[in-house]
Image (cartoon, rainbow, N blue to C red):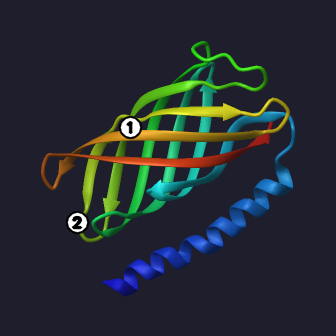
Amino acid sequence: MRFKSTMYKLLFIPAFIFAFGAINANAQTNAGDFGIGVIIGEPTGISAKYYAGGNHAFDFGLAWSMGRNDNFHFHADYLIHRFDLINVESGRLPFYYGIGGRLRTGPGSQAGIRFPLGLSYYFPRDPIEIFFEVVPILDLTPGTDISGNSGVGVRFYFTK
């Protein structure tokens, strides 16, 4: 089992290098609707966000979970951003919340419903977002349970 876990981690190293190389080559000061980056915490991996219009977005994560068992983790969330709650001198600092799903594969595989809550900071002149989130989870399989994720991350947005 340890070999499989190590292989998952080794597959992410080239993915991170590729993602950052592509991001640095194409990210510019005119931020677009699609961002990609990393999330560090539980889980740790690649994070992406697509703004579907206004304050609505879809968030995706492809990562490994280092909790009780080393598992491959995938999540997808629908998010609503509240840009009007926190005023800052420059940039934007929205609170966001939403609902989504999570799938963890490997030993102790689970599927559940995610309820993400977080804060993002968007830099005023750069296509960069930093974020912190806490995510209560209602696990549905293999049995009903309450768990959670949390992490910090950064995303670079591609130009329009």
Graded by Cα atoms within 10 Å as few (under 14), some (14 to 19) or many (20 or more), the crowding at tag 2 reads few
Report whether 44 appears left or right of 20: left
* Residue corresponding to mark 1: 100
- Pick whichever, 134 or 80, lies toward us: 134
For label 2, the residue is 108
Point 47% across, 55% down: residue: 41
Quarter residue 70 falls in: bottom left
Q: Position of residue 60 (x, y in %)?
A: 51, 46
Task: Please determine whether, in this image, residue 142 is positioned above or below residue 87.
Answer: below
Taking the view exactly as shown, the residue that stands out farthest to the top is 84
Inter-mark Cα distance, 1 to 2:
20 Å
The C terminus - image quarter? top right
Q: Is residue 25 above or below residue 32?
A: below
Whole-percent x and y of residue 64?
Answer: 44, 64
* Amino acid residing under circle 1: Gly
Element type at mark 2: loop
- The extreme left residue here reads 143
